[in-house]
Amino acid sequence: MSVSSLYYLNGSTLSSSTAVFTDSSMVTCAPDGWYSDGSVSRQQVDCVLLAQQVCNCEYACPSSKSRQAPPDNQAKGIFEFSYNSGNDDTSTGAIAILIDINPGNIIGVKAVLNSVVYSSVVSANWGYLSTTSGDITFLGNNTESVCSVVSSGGWSYSLHEFSSDAPGFFFTDTGLTTDFNLTSAQTMALVPGPMDTAVMIIPKTAPTPNDLKVYLYALCPNNSEPPQQPYRFGIEAHCPTGLPTFSSTIRFEPGEGSIGPICAASLTQTYYFFQIHSSVNPSEVGLYDYVFSDINGANPLPNGWYRTPATTTSFDIIEVENGIVIGMLAYCF
């Protein structure tokens, strides 16, 4: 089992260091074993760090990791966010990814865990947002950017590659570039107003694999004439956590014909949710919340109506679509 403790390095990073110490004077060598900063893992033997490699020890997930675009960055780029979500027995549950985009920017997002690609997000103001083609969802305000409509021939970009592996608060430019083609406006999930925090839920049903990667695509400036404004956005990932529960009836088909049966039905089901709407009550299910049939968030609830006492006192039925609460109804009072 991993243990989090304070250690000292004789280099600026774990990658560049030759040894790990237990004191700031770097006199007492740390015990032999594996050491990790969340991105890099190295084994120390007789006060010497061996070559960087995949750690075969158990690793507990850190509380969170966040990065922001470099200040005044004007380079179009792909920003790769790497997150070690832990491989010990507690490292399962729903991973919450929070993405903030400044006004005027359009940012594409996709995440990969265990070779599965995720791109749908939910916003407290705009609800469910997802691409209709491809595996990248572009988010932003369609009234503030020159990239709100893709030309019929599409666009091609040479993108700088940025990484989150180096210590610090900002992404770092790797000096590499890659070509990227945006061929269809259908990949856009833009909204007609300011974009608030977008939340992506990624299910982690087993301790391993634990290497989560999120890719942010910064393609579109927020003005068409120089001087171009910088890309400004941030991302934060949280450790996998078991979701809270709520009691409910079984699913009913939406419609007036469901009112009688759903009101008479017993609360026989236990479901799970991730709160998106703002509430002082952490046990309350509300508009645009994620809802699932499992604790890890792997199985969204099927579309339909569900009666639950977990809503506010004004409503008693939730309408679900794409695993999201899209409506609140008051029928059974």
Image: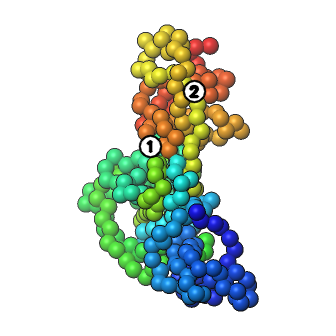
Q: Quadrant of residue 28?
A: bottom right
Query: Can residue 28 be seen in this snapshot?
Result: yes
- Type of the residue with mark 2: Ser
Secondary element at image label 1: loop
Crowdedness near tag 2: few (<14), some (14–19) or many (≥20) residues, C-alpha within 10 Å:
some
Compared with 104, 258 (above or below) is above
Q: Which mark is residue 46?
A: none
Residue drawn at the location 54% of the way across and 54% of the way down: 89
The number of numbered badges drawn on the structure is 2
Between disc 1 and disc 2, whose residue precedes?
A: 2
**Residue 196 x %, y %:** 57, 50
Q: To which residue does mark 2 refer? A: 247
Q: Quadrant of residue 217?
A: bottom left
**Residue 56 x %, y %:** 47, 69
Compared with 323, 5 (above or below) is below
Q: To which residue does mark 1 refer? A: 298
The residue lying toward the viewer, choosing from 133 and 140, is 133
- CA separation, marks 1 and 2? 18 Å
Q: Quadrant of residue 153?
A: bottom left
Residue drawn at the location 58% of the way across and 34% of the way down: 245
Residue drawn at the location 58% of the way across and 31% of the way down: 246
**Residue 104 x %, y %:** 52, 59
Query: Can residue 101 be seen in this snapshot?
Result: no
Locate the N terminus by quadrant.
Answer: bottom right
Residue drawn at the location 71% of the way across and 90% of the way down: 27
Secondary element at image label 2: strand
